[in-house]
Amino acid sequence: MSHSQTRPSPVGPPKSTARPAGPGPAKGWCVPKQQATVAQLQSNINYVCNQGVDCKPIQPGGACYNPNNVRAHATYAMNTFYQTKGRQPYQCDFS
């Protein structure tokens, strides 16, 4: 390339005019409230597992069975429900 020729400036992708999605209610995790009782957590598990969520992972021998306690199992079930049903705030409104 001679000194009289110039290289074209690199061209990147067009700049988006859309605003990036920030953290909000449609993102994140659904976890039980700290004050939830064992009975409430078990009720949440029963509800979610009867709504079509695959609860096999929290059954004995399942990949998420351990730790074997109601809070851990409820966390798995409630979050799976939330993630698979659209991640809307009302899908994480458990007792």
Image (tube, rainbow, N blue to C red):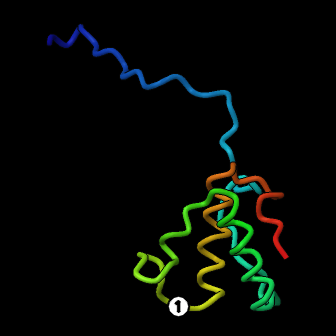
Measured as percent of width and height from the top left, residue 22 is found at: 69, 51
Query: How busy is the neighbourhood of tag 1: few (under 14 within 10 Å), some, or many (20 plus)?
Result: few
* 31 shown above or below 21: below
Q: Looking at the rendering, which quadrant does residue 12 occupy? A: top left
Q: Indicate the amino acid at tag 1.
A: Asn
Residue at point 41%, 75% (across, down): 63
Q: Which one is in front, 16 or 85?
A: 85
Q: Which one is in front, 6 or 53?
A: 53
Q: Looking at the rendering, which quadrant does residue 36 occupy? A: bottom right
Q: Which one is in front, 47 or 70?
A: 47
Measured as percent of width and height from the top left, residue 72 is found at: 60, 84
Using residue 74 as the reference point, say whether residue 68 is left or right of it: left
Residue at point 61%, 63% (across, down): 80
* 74 shown above or below 83: below
Measured as percent of width and height from the top left, residue 52 is found at: 63, 56
Tag 1 residue: 68
* SS for dot 1: loop
The residue furthest front is: 50
